[in-house]
Image (cartoon, grey):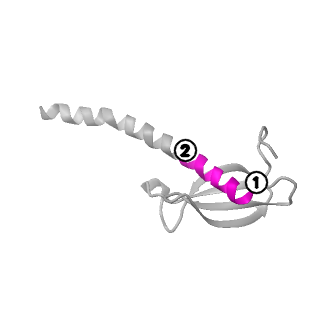
Amino acid sequence: MRTFAVPLAVLALPVQVAHAGHGRSQELKAAKALAEAETGGVAVDARRVFLNGTHIRDGLPGGIQVRVHMPGRKDGWSCLIDADTLKLRRKEPIPNPPRRSGRGG
């Protein structure tokens, strides 16, 4: 009976990993939407970054950096969002990143 417990646990692992990856993409989309709402611009990209000494590879929340294009302006924004609470932590002006094709603005 115990011999079946290990293979079943191994079979359930890919389902959990696939679900975790789906959650991260949703988390990045939510961070981009928050950055757009806070700045009034168009989010260009988002990436996971270290926050408060956390390490991404350890599976700890960390943060999300979102670069925002501001149409008609010289400067854009770099927003740092806490991945655990999805709240804006910092907003810094940066040279306006090129906007992605197909997006408004």
Which range of residues does the magenta coloring cover? Answer: 27-41
Residue 48 relative to residue 99: left or right:
left
Q: Residues within 10 Å of mark 1 (few under 14, many from 20)?
A: some
Q: Position of residue 86 (x, y in %)?
A: 55, 57
Q: Is residue 1 magenta?
A: no
Q: How many discs mark residues in the rendered view?
A: 2
Element carrying mark 1: loop
- Work out which quarter of the rendered image holds the N terminus and state it: top left
**Dot 2 amino acid type:** Gln
The mark found on residue 26 in the picture is 2
The mark found on residue 99 in the picture is none
Q: Hey, which quadrant is residue 82 in on the image?
A: bottom right
Residue at 62%, 62% in the rendered image:
80
Q: What residue would you read off at disc 1? A: 41
Element carrying mark 2: helix
Q: Tell me the CA gap for discs 2 and 1.
A: 20 Å
**Dot 1 amino acid type:** Gly
Residue at 69%, 55% in the rendered image:
37
Q: Hey, which quadrant is residue 92 in on the image?
A: bottom right
Residue 31 relative to residue 98: left or right:
left
Q: Position of residue 19 (x, y in %)?
A: 44, 39
Q: Position of residue 16 (x, y in %)?
A: 38, 39
Residue 5 relative to residue 40: left or right:
left
Give whichever of discs 2 and 1 has the lower sequence position.
Answer: 2
User: Vertical placement of 52 versus 4: above or below?
Assistant: below
Q: Hey, which quadrant is residue 49 in on the image?
A: bottom right
Q: Residues within 10 Å of mark 2 (few under 14, many from 20)?
A: few
Q: Position of residue 64 (x, y in %)?
A: 58, 56
User: Is residue 40 or residue 26 the one in the foreground?
Assistant: 40
Q: What secondary structure do most residues of the magenta stretch adopt?
A: helix
Residue at 87%, 54% in the rendered image:
72
Residue at 82%, 47% in the rendered image:
105
